[in-house]
Amino acid sequence: MVPAYKLTYFPVAALAEPTRFLFSYGGIEFEDYRFEEKNWPQIKPNMPFGQVPILEHNGKVAHQSIAMARYAAKQVKLVGSNDWEDLEIDAIVDTINDLRQKIGLYGYETDEAIKELRKEPLFKEVLPYYLERLDNIVKANNGHLALGKLTWADLYFVALLKYLNFLCGTDIIADYSHLVALKKSVLEIPAIKAWVEKRPKSDV
Ligand code: GSH
């Protein structure tokens, strides 16, 4: 049977990976459509806002990676049990995304001189600021980023890590033991483990 969902993205983990993790976690089949970078100029004009990932379902098209991850999380029951709990999860996911954007200013900079200028503030200030706080949250939260239990915030963070590490050129959580433990516990979930083993290999 043709899967009910089609996820379209570049041939990398990055912004599509949280949704891939979440569908895999819940055993929801999806078509993992990865186009070749050379075909992007033809694909881009057909995207709702000129970007990917997009998620297609029942003839409809959705964009925005966090919105689609939140949708997938609802499908696989990794959300909160009331609006306040969802707010707590969303706040963590948005914080991770704030960090991603700050990392992107460094990682995507093509002018080497500017990149060098951004290096010290990122590695000495921004990363410690965010990662210490996230590590403390996991420490105080029974090994999780929100609600003291597994939620989509945990999967979101671990799924995105490969991309964040790539942009920084290093394992950004290596010195944060509670984040390391969180990563390990998420990657040990059988359905996630199976997904990571079978997913196409990529650096990003
Ligand atoms: N806020 C959007 C989301 O989270 O989905 C950002 C999407 C985004 O930045 N997509 C990038 C893209 O499509 C790939 S990671 N880049 C190609 C382009 O903009 O032409």
Image: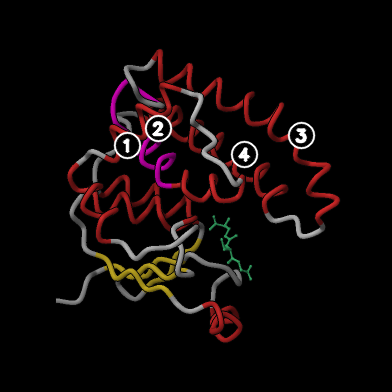
Q: Residues within 10 Å of mark 4 (few under 14, many from 20)?
A: few
Image quarter where the N terminus lies is bottom left
User: Which quadrant would residue 195 be assigned to in this image?
Assistant: bottom left
> Disc 1 marks which residue?
79
- Image quarter where ligand 1 lies: bottom right
Q: Earlier in the sequence, mark 1 or mark 4?
A: 1
In the drawing, what numbered circle is on residue 86? 2
Residue at x 60%, y 69% (from the top left corner) = 49
| Disc 1 to disc 2: CB gap under 8 Å | yes
Residue at x 54%, y 46% (from the top left corner) = 164
Estimate the spatial distance between the alpha carbons at disc 4 and disc 3, rounded to whole Å: 18 Å
- In the depicted structure, whether residue 171 falls above or below residue 166: above
Estimate the spatial distance between the alpha carbons at disc 3 and disc 2, rounded to whole Å: 35 Å
In the drawing, what numbered circle is on residue 190? none
Question: In terms of depth relative to the viewer, which is nearer, 189 or 4?
Answer: 189
> Disc 3 marks which residue?
120
**Mark closer to the observer (4, 3):** 3
Q: Earlier in the sequence, mark 3 or mark 2?
A: 2
Residue type at the position of mark 1: Val
> Disc 4 marks which residue?
98
